Image: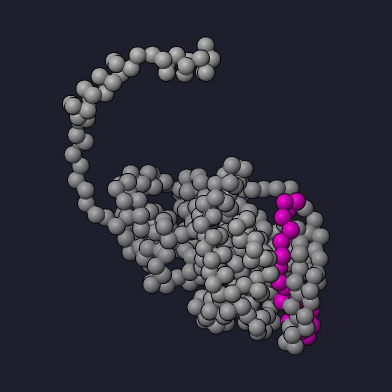
Amino acid sequence: MDRRTALGLMSSAPLTGIVSGISAAQQMGAPPDQPRELIPDGADMGSLFPDMERLVGRNQYPYSFLTNRFRSAEEYRKAGREVVLDALGYQPPRAPAAAQVVDRQDLGEFIREKVLFSTSADFRVPAYVHIPKGLKGRAPAIVDLHSHGGMFLFGKEKVIDFGGNHPVMTEYHQVNYGGRPTATALVRRGYVVITIDAFMFGERRLVMDADLKYGWDRSHYSVDDAKHLNEVCASKESTLAQSLMLAGMTWEGIVLWDDMRTVDYLISRPEVDPNRIGCVGISFGGYRSFFLAGMDDRISAACVVGFMSTVKPMARRHIDTHSWVHFVPTLHRYLDWPDIVAMRAPKPLLVLQCRRDGLFPLQGHAGIGREDSGDRCQGRRERSVYRSFLRRAASV
């Protein structure tokens, strides 16, 4: 019997018994719910937080250097990086950069180039490269990793002072960078500096059909236009993450791959000393910085600003404060965030984190609070991973 025939028979069948059964159930009433005490907790997951806390608490990070399962620093790096790349889900074949300089300006103290280059066969990425003038040889270089801040309309421009900045960028620079965008400040100190648009930001942002009327050129956007378009992009973060999951990938997987391929391009430049490359970033840029620093040996020095915590203390009230890009399925089955950046030890690392950063719980980075699994101080864990690595790496 096909579906159409079955539905026809059902529609012609007597309904007396069904109706009487429903009436009886309504008269009797459904049994009451089992009693449960409801206590306000302020958790992002509300009444489901105890379940989440239990599940998150199970993570023992078996690939951490603190487990003592690894016989050497190199063994830890190799195994940890394989786990991270597998969790991120994006390892396309390497493609030639095929770099193209599309604009070049002499700004007196330095040269600014706008460049397009390929990070894979999938993406051609826009970047700005700042080059100090008067170089007498190869110079140290910085990969400057821009922040999130709810500002999707601009990416690489967040760390650059163009002199005549878009009004929303003038405010953004003041609030997030103290009025001193880092790429401009660093090139004035003698560094070659590169910054790209992370996927979903700047010239790689999303534009919905309803917003095509605004055009593509951001210099024409009013402050109200920028606010609206940012809100649209923010509302589509989950759509991006879900779409990439259908492809077996993650948002951070694309971000990290692009950042590592940016190092490839940077060391190909004749102005750059390949042995003196650093990275820096704040917030989402700090997140990008600790991934890049932990995953790429060519980063000689790294600075992570405003993004470091162990993850377990974040489960209560610091989920909704973060972007979808910060959540990588299965990653924390193996490693905590500090474990990732620890893979760069014993190379220099500076982590700056403040007590009033509302995006992170204080016990995740300030040396207070307890882990669910024992009495080791959760906040000390991020330091102990790195220090343990330094001690053992020095002995092998």
Depicted 145 relative to depicted 252: above or below: below
Residue 141 sits inside the magenta stretch: no
Coloured how? one colour
Residue 267 seen in the current view: no
Left or right of 37 on screen, residue 105: right
Q: Position of residue 152 (x, y in %)?
A: 57, 65
Q: Residue furthest bottom?
A: 108
Which quadrant is the C terminus positioned in?
A: bottom right
90 sits left or right of 115 in the view: left
Could you say which quadrant of the image residue 130 lies in? bottom right
Q: Residue at x 38, y 72 (%)?
A: 356
Judging depth in this view, the residue of 287 and 46 nearest the camera is 46
- Give the quarter of the image for residue 155: bottom right
Which residue extends farthest top? 1
Find out whether residue 129 is within the magenta segment.
Answer: yes
Residue 271 placed where, x, y %? Answer: 78, 74
Rendered position, 30 above or below 259: above
The residue closer to the viewer here, 14 or 287, is 14
Q: Residue at x 41, y 57 (%)?
A: 320
Q: Is residue 132 visible?
A: yes
Q: Is residue 386 above or below residue 239?
A: below
Q: How many marks?
A: 0
Q: Residue 326's spot in the image, x, y percent?
A: 51, 56
Residue occupying the point 35% across, 55% down: 44
Q: Is residue 130 left or right of residue 240?
A: right
Q: How far from the left and from the top, in percent, is residue 240?
A: 57, 51
Residue at horizontal 29%, vertical 48%? 47
Q: Which residues are magenta?
A: 120-138
